[in-house]
Amino acid sequence: MADTGFHPRIAIGGVPVHAMLVPFPIACFTGALLTDLAYAGSAEVQWTNFSQWLLLAGTVFAGLAAVFGLLDYVLNPRPARPGIGLWHMVLNLVLFVLAVVNNFVHARDGWTSVVPTGLTLSAVMVLIMIVSGFLGHRMAYVHIARDARHADRRDERPDGRTIREDRP
Amino acid sequence: MKRTAPLLLAAALAALLGACGRGAEAPRQYGFNPPLPEPRQFLFPPMGIADPVGWGDAMPTVPPGFVVQRFAAGLNSPRNVLPLPNGDLIVAQAAGPNLEPNLRPKSFIFSWLMNSSHGGEKGASPGEDALLLLRDTNHDGVADQKVILTGKLASPFGLAWANNTLYVGMTDSVWRYAFTPGQTTLGQGTLLTPLPGGPIDHHWTKSIALSPDGSKLYAGVGSNSNIVENGLEAEHDRAMIFEVDPQSGARRPFATGLRNPNGLTFYPGTNTLYAVINERDELGNNLVPDYMTSVRPGGHYGWPWSYYGQHVDVRVQPQRPDMVARAIVPDYALSAHVAALGLAFLKGGNFPAQYQGGAFIGEHGSWDRNVFNGYQVAFVPFVNGRPSGTPQTFLGGFTMSGRKVHGRPVGLAFGPDGALYVADDAGNTVWRVSWRGDAR
C-alpha cells in the first residue's frame, strides 16, 4: 500500500506557502479588533482608519492563504486528507465571508463604521480564528506529524526518497 | 467546497442589493416639514453615479414660452456665472482642487467613482482654473467674445461685484480685483481674507454674496467630510457662513452647522440672506433632504450633530445634545441628494408673473440614490417673500437613458437682460434661458 501521509503540494524549501500566509490574517484581524476597541473607547477616527486597512490586508491574505490551503488539500489523495482539515476550512470560509462583510461595515462614515456592528464582527472573527487556528495547527503538528511518523517507520515516501534523506 | 465562498458572498451581496432596491419611489421630501424616513446604515450605500457624455446637438428643455440658447460651449468645467450691468458675463472655471488624500480603502474607490462623474467630456486640469469674460456684442443670445481674464487660480467659484470691485471666492481665500464693466483685462488682485482650503478640502466651493448695501460680504465654507469621518479637527472654521468686512477682510462666523452652503443670495429688496445646503449622505435614498433656507444671524443648523432640526445623527461621537437643542429647522426642503449648488431669485425682467420673486435652483444631481434626483434647474415659487408650493423643473433634459447625462447644472444668475444664465460644468456650457413672449 502506498504512503497515506499528507504532504503539502505547494511549498518553498519544504515550507507550505499556506503556512507562510496564515500569520497575516491572524495578525491583521486581531489588530483590527484592537483598533476597533481603541476607536470605541476614544472616537478618534484614525483608529477606525487603521481597522479598515488591517481588515483589507487581512482579507486579501486570508483569500490567498485559502487558495493555497485548498490546493494542498485537494491535491493530496483522498485517504491522505485529515478530517480535521475540513473543519478548519469550513470555519475559515465563514471567517472570510464575515471579513468581507466587515470591510463594508467599516466603510461607513463615522461611529457606525465600528460601533456596534463592526466591533462585534471583529470580535466574532477573532473567536473563529482561535478555533480554526487551533484546528489548523493541530492538523499540522498532530495529524500530519503522526502520519509522517508512520511513514517514517516505512522509511519511504511516494516520491521514492526516504524521510531520513530530508534530515540534516 | 471550493465554490462555497463565492456562492456565500454572492448570496450576501444579492440580499444587500435587494435591500437597497427599495428606494425607487419618487421622493416626497419637499417643502415644509418634509416626511423624513428612518435613517438606515448600509453595507453598500445607495448609488447612481452619473456618466457625463456632453450635449452634442441636444438641448435642455424649458417650459412653454421660454427659449434656451447655448450662450457659450466648449468651456472647461464652468461652475458659476456673474452677469455684469453691461451684459458681460464673468464665468468661474474650476477643475476642483483634488487634494483629498486616500486615508482609507473607501477613499480610493470613491475618488475614482466621483472623478468619473465630474470631469465632463474633456476634464479640466487645475492649470485651467480661470476667470473668463463672455460678451454678446450683437445681442443674439450667444457669446461672440471669450477672454481669459486671469488663470491659474485656486479653484474659483464664488463671484460678486459692486462698486467697481470684483470679489472672487477661491477655495482657500476671497480675493478682490478692481473691475469696471466693459474691461476685458484684469489687474493684480489683493487677498481679502483666507478661508479654510486644504488639506483634504472635501467641499471646496466658496460661494460669496455682498449685502445689498455692499457693506458686508458673506462666504460659505463647506464641511471637510460627509459626516466628520476625517475627524472634528478637520472641520475647524467649516460648515458655516462667514461675514467678512469687504474693506479690511476681518471675518466672523455668521451662521454655523450648514454642511455645504452654496448659492448665497440676498432675497431681492430685503436684507435676508438665503442659501442652498447640501445635506449628509449614506443614510438612505430619501435622507437627508438638501434644503433652501433664509440664514439667521448666529443660527446653528445642526451639522454634524443633527439634521433638519433635532434629528440626531448617531454617526457623530461624542454627541452634543446642547448643539442639537439649538439646531434650527430650515425653511424649505428640496428633496434628498439633489446637490443644490446655485440659487437665484427673479426680480423684474419679462418672465411671467408666476415666476416673479421665485427661486431658481441649480441642482448638480445625486450620487447617493439608486434613482437620479436633481440634474435640473428647479423653480420654487414664492408668495409674500416665502417659498410656497412644490418645486418644478425649469431647465431639464440633463439626464439620458441609464446613467448617462448630458451635463450637470451648477451656479446660475439673472442678467440685466432678464435672461437666466446657467453654468453646466459637466456639459462645459453656459445656457441662456429667456422668455419668448408667448406660451404656445
Image (spheres, coloured by chain):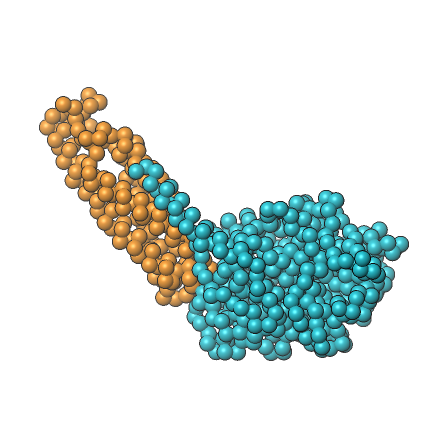
Chain colours: A orange, B cyan
Quadrant location of residue B27? bottom right
Relative to the observer, which residue lies in front, A117 or B433? B433
Q: Residue at x 71, y 74 (%)?
A: B383
Q: Is residue B134 above or below residue A161?
A: below
Q: Position of residue A98 (x, y in %)?
A: 34, 50
State the residue lying farthest toward the front. B440
Q: Residue at x 44, y 54 (%)?
A: B19
Side (left or right) of B290 relative to B45 = right
Relative to the observer, which residue lies in front, B416 or B356? B356
Q: How many marks?
A: 0
Q: Residue at x 80, y 65 (%)?
A: B351
State the residue lying farthest toward the right. B138
Q: Quadrant of the N terminus of chain B?
A: top left
Side (left or right) of A7 relative to B323 = left
Examine the rendering and report whether any part of residue B227 can be seen.
yes
Q: Residue at x 78, y 69 (%)?
A: B353
Side (left or right) of A17 relative to B438 = left
Quadrant location of residue A93? top left
Q: Is residue B75 above or below residue A45?
A: above
Examine the rendering and report whether any part of residue B125 can be seen.
no
Relative to the observer, which residue lies in front, A72 or B307? B307
Q: Position of residue A139 (x, y in %)?
A: 20, 40
